[in-house]
Image (cartoon, helix red, strand yellow):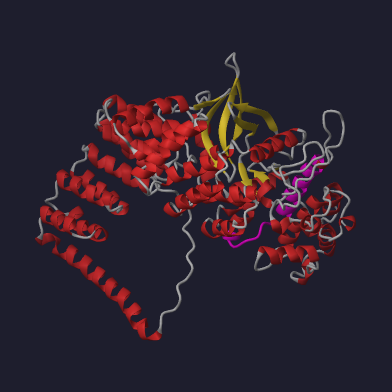
Amino acid sequence: MNTVEPIWFGRYRLTSRIATGGMAEVYLGRHIDEAGNFGPMVAVKRLLPHLVKDPQIVRMFLNEARITAQITHPNVVRILDLGQEGTEPFIAMELLEGRTFADVRQKAADDGRRVPLGITLRILTDACRGLDAAHRAVDEEGNPISLVHRDFTPDNIHVGVSGEVKVIDFGIAKTNSWGSGTEPGTLKGKFFYMSPEMILAKPVDHRADLFAAGVMLYEQLCGHRPFTGLSIDEVVMRIAEGGHKPPRTFDPSVPEALEAVCMTALQKDPDQRFPSLQEFNTALEAIGGPAQLSTPEEVGAYVAALFPAEKDARRQTIKRARLMDPSHPGTPAAGAVAVGMTPPAGSGPLTPSKEESPSAQVEPAAAPASSNRWILVAIPVVMTVLGVVGGYWYKNRAPDMTPDALLTAAVAAKPSERAAALEPLLAHSAATAEHFERASKLLIESNAWDLALKASEAWQKKSPQDARAFILEGRAAAQLRKGKRAEAALEKAAALAPADVEVDLALAQLRELQGDAAGALAAYDNALKKKPTSVDLKAKRGFWLSQAGRLDEAAALLSGVLATRFDAISAAELAFVKQRQGQLGPAVDLLKKAIKADPTLMSAHYYLGAIQHAQGDIKGARASYLEADRLAPTDPRAVTALCQMDSQQKAPELAETRKKIQQRFPEQATSLLNSCP
């Protein structure tokens, strides 16, 4: 395997994408100056491609960096650089390893616990210390910038594995110097943490952030929010009215002094709250006893225990990205794995991960009429019995059937029944490597990956030096998200058959599933060296060049593919390249051809919607986004882009679009909805 090649973005060498939100992506990168000197590893934040040409989004993006750069405090994330590469703005900031306070609370809740009071108080007071410094920040001329964060929530407090706490994401903050990206009368931020004055569109100052701190403290003390309701409108109304119950109503063990601090912070009238977060902190720190603050070391140990380095996917992402950096002394000679760069739908046999693509929520069907209920009950019972009987028949008849007969029966069976038909083959004494190869193709076609993995094991027992058996293991393990096993199997296959292009293709598929664009490119490069005339391989490599942002190379390769034959996926991806190069007319022509050739290609409709939006064709963009969303309901990109457009246009459909995101992507809803308030 070859070393993975990083991606260059201006003066930053980007190793891997480590996070994605509703508006931007974050990459691990390293600054390298003209003399070749290495800077520290940083997090480089880039807008999503379809937002780069939206002036309001760009303004908010740049305001975040300008505002945050004015604040120098250990409890606020540091902005190291703000710039523009071509037409694309970017922010380079310090690299943080840990989780948000929201993640910490959710993981504790998943384990049936509440975050210990001392831990929460330390996290909250440290965050308030940083935000208080932001409230007091001045510009270059010494004038107060009068900052209000307006989105001070658990999602925007980062807690490091070493115990450091930092306020992040000043994307919708307001200052005297730059204002904000918010139009007058538009609500920003998360409703549960909004102050009454924000809800009622009254003048807002730093005490709105103090109210949000009070909400977070109340959640800790009571186990629920102070203002709840069955709809956003109901929550907003209750916040505006006030009148929440004191924490000791729900838990008499809460110290009276702690309850008093919480209730003061949550006063409806800003003048009745603490004058500043500094006074809020002073009051909390003075309580002591059961409300004694934990130490930063105790916070770090708690977070590290909740998210252990060897198991936590996000920490593993950063670790692997670090190892991929060529200037890192521990960089492996073989390509290291980087995860997080999710390929778009319609780009081949890629399946979204469980975390990124939760199943859509489906409304329950109406109850059937009583006269028909026995039919609905009987059908699944009969089908279950038939399945059990069928499986039993296959297994017990296996000794009487030859491997060829089992394969013939499997071919004749329905795709859903092929796994059961082929299972007896795995233990058949007469089965050969050729039988296993034929069976593996049927299992792959049926997406029966569990049985395909078992088939690879049986095949290896029969033929321990057959590279094809290890390739099958690598493919199946990759689909089952068993990355380490897939790596090991493909290394063995490469050692047994170094000239076999199928090894490189299986490795490319693994890298695609891991979202590792650089790794996929390296694998396709190897494959093309072995089959330099393969148009299919050129198309795949062109796609990943585009996804990696290497636009000129992608344009040349994809144009060559289309000159040889028309391929809808390649045409759509070339259109995406041309869109980013500013060639909107040719991009639209390519997308229309792609859609005509394959009307079900989600990416073509999504890319077309982005161009139509940029051109001001709102009706056309809506139709394209809706079609893309219909074709790929587990991919959040189209519906998120539609939500952003609805928000900008103040469209009446915005509420329905937001509801759709909440229902379909509950785990990602917070970050996705932040981009279309």
Q: Quadrant of residue 178?
A: top right
* Magenta-drawn stretch contains 142: no
* Magenta-drawn stretch contains 122: yes
**Looking at the image, which is closer to me, 80 or 306?**
80
- What is the magenta segment's predominant secondary structure? helix
In x, y percent, where is residue 126? 76, 45
**Looking at the image, which is closer to me, 251 or 37?**
37
In the displayed structure, does residue 597 sit left or right of residue 82? left
The span shown in magenta is 109-134
In the displayed structure, does residue 107 sit left or right of residue 323? right
Residue 636 visible in the snapshot? no
In x, y percent, where is residue 574? 42, 33
Above or below for 99 versus 199 = above
Q: Which residue lies most toward the bottom here? A: 371
In the displayed structure, does residue 291 sit left or right of residue 546? right
**Looking at the image, which is closer to me, 174 or 107?**
174
In x, y percent, where is residue 431? 14, 50
Q: Residue at x 72, y 49 (%)?
A: 151
In x, y percent, where is residue 508? 36, 36
**Looking at the image, which is closer to me, 84 or 127?**
84
Above or below for 259 versus 143 = below
In the picture, the quarter occupied by the N terminus is: top left
Q: Quadrant of residue 265?
A: bottom right
Q: Residue at x 76, y 63 (%)?
A: 239
